[in-house]
Every structure is written in structure tokens, then in C-alpha cells.
Image (cartoon, rainbow, N blue to C red):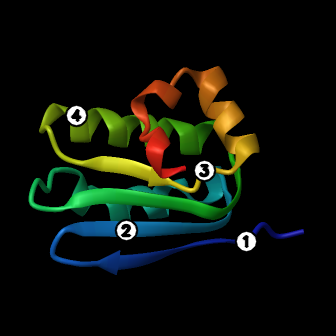
């Protein structure tokens, strides 16, 4: 069975939002990393991930998320994750990254 994953990007004056849809794993990591690279150092707009339709994330995906958190913090730029499903939030708790996420938006 082929896992399905895609992102939908929305750009506004204030934010760049990536909606994650499906199962995010190693097979899609390089593609997403390449797409994110152009926005990691941008200070003018917040970077937002919407996980409402994310069904699965593996350790590679969590690693990319940690990279994004660090990169955005280093330049003091906005970053948040919206609509984290409970089973993925549990993974974030175990990985120790929940404290770096915007809980008000869940």
C-alpha cells in the first residue's frame, strides 16, 4: 500500500501556512525540506503548520519539525502548529517538543 502525503501552501502578507495531509514519513522528507528551506529564514511572515489532516508522522518528520523550531527561534521569527491530532500530540510529548509549540491553537 502506497502512503499518501501532500501539503497545501497558502501565502499571505502575514504568514506562510503549510497544511499537512496524510502520512508524513521518510519517503517525503527531502521534498518537504526543500520546499521549507526558502521560508525558514524569512522574518517578515510567520510560518504555520496545520496538522488537522495529518494522520501519521515518523521520526524523520519530527526531526524536520525540530529543525524548523530551532531555525525560527534563532532569528526570533513566528512559528506555530495548528490542530495537532491527539495521537500526534502524544508523540510530541514523548519527544519533548510539546513545550515549544503553541498550545492555544490546538
Helix, strand or loop at mark 1: loop
Whether residue 105 is visible: yes
Q: CA distance from mark 2 to mark 1?
A: 20 Å
Disc 4 target residue: 73
Relative to 36, does residue 1 appear above or below in the rendering? below
Q: Earlier in the sequence, mark 3 or mark 4?
A: 4
Q: CA distance from mark 3 to mark 4?
A: 20 Å
Helix, strand or loop at mark 4: helix
Asked whether the residues under the numbered discs 4 and 1 touch, taking CB atoms below 8 Å apart as contact, a structural biologist would say: no
Asked whether the residues under the numbered discs 3 and 4 touch, taking CB atoms below 8 Å apart as contact, a structural biologist would say: no
The residue drawn where x is 69% and y is 51% is 85
Disc 1 target residue: 4
- 106 vs 46, left or right, is right
Circle number at residue 17 = 2
- 47 vs 89, left or right, is left
Q: 44 or 24, which lies in front?
A: 44
Circle number at residue 18 = none
Q: Residues within 10 Å of mark 3 (few under 14, many from 20)?
A: many
Amino acid at each position: 500500500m502506497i502512503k499518501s502525503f501532500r501539503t497545501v501552501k497558502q501565502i499571505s502578507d502575514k504568514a506562510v501556512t503549510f497544511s499537512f495531509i496524510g502520512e508524513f514519513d521518510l519517503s517525503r522528507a527531502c521534498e518537504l525540506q526543500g520546499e521549507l528551506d526558502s521560508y525558514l529564514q524569512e522574518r517578515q511572515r510567520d510560518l504555520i503548520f496545520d496538522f488537522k489532516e495529518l494522520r501519521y508522522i515518523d521520526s524523520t518528520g519530527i526531526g524536520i519539525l525540530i529543525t524548523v523550531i530551532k531555525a525560527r527561534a534563532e532569528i526570533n521569527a513566528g512559528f506555530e502548529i495548528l490542530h495537532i491530532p491527539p495521537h500526534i500530540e502524544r508523540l510530541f510529548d514523548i519527544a519533548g517538543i510539546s513545550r515549544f509549540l503553541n498550545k492555544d491553537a490546538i
